[in-house]
Image: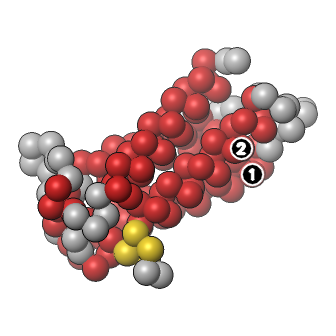
Amino acid sequence: MSARAKALFVLIIFGFLVSLYLTLKAHHPESVACSIGGACETVLSSRYAWLFGVSVAVWGLIWYAAGLILAYLAFFKRTYPWFYFLVWSVGGVVFSLYLLGLEAFKIHAYCTWCLSSLAAVVIIFLLTLTSRKELTND
């Protein structure tokens, strides 16, 4: 497995664990450990922390789980789903940037956990763009 593939796996697992933690804390945002300067409680208790009655963290958990399935198919079953990786990662970047916009312009607070997930999503997207040869039959 290449270094890019390992980095993808590590980032997807990291994001999955962040989303899992936030999912477990969704009903008690005041109990979320947040780094200095972060306003996790403010973000996670805002009305924007829920989408269609489901915690945004659960949506993240589902997104990262889909990434784990895609990574498994690509690197162990060799089914080469680069296009699906691209669609998946673009969706993640778009939604994560939307959430960042909400933090900046509506909530006026930033969640350290959310920002770490955003960083993982952006790096996953960049790795996906540069991994076409590894993820296709070409």
Q: Quadrant of residue 22?
A: bottom left
Question: How many C-alpha atoms fall within 10 Å of the one at disc 2: few (<14), some, or many (≥20)?
Answer: many
Give how far across and how far down residue 68 sits, in percent.
63, 42
Give how far across and how far down residue 138 sits, in percent.
90, 32
Give the CA distance from mark 1 to mark 2.
Answer: 8 Å
Give how far across and how far down residue 40 sits, in percent.
19, 57
Q: Is residue 135 left or right of residue 97?
A: right
* Position above or below: 111 against 8: below
Circle 1: residue type: Tyr
Q: Nearer the viewer, residue 133 or 35?
A: 35
Seen at 32% across and 75% down, the residue is: 48
Query: Would residue 129 be visible to someone looking at this image?
Result: no
Question: How many C-alpha atoms fall within 10 Å of the one at disc 1: few (<14), some, or many (≥20)?
Answer: few
* Position above or below: 123 against 39: above
Q: Is residue 58 left or right of residue 106?
A: right
Q: Quadrant of residue 28?
A: bottom left
User: Do residues under tags 1 and 2 come within 8 Å of each other at their CB atoms?
Assistant: yes
Give the mark, 1 or 2, whose residue is nearer the N terminus.
2
* Position above or below: 37 against 104: above
Give how far across and how far down residue 26 sits, in percent.
31, 64
Q: Which residue is tagged 1?
A: 84
Q: Which residue is tagged 2?
A: 70
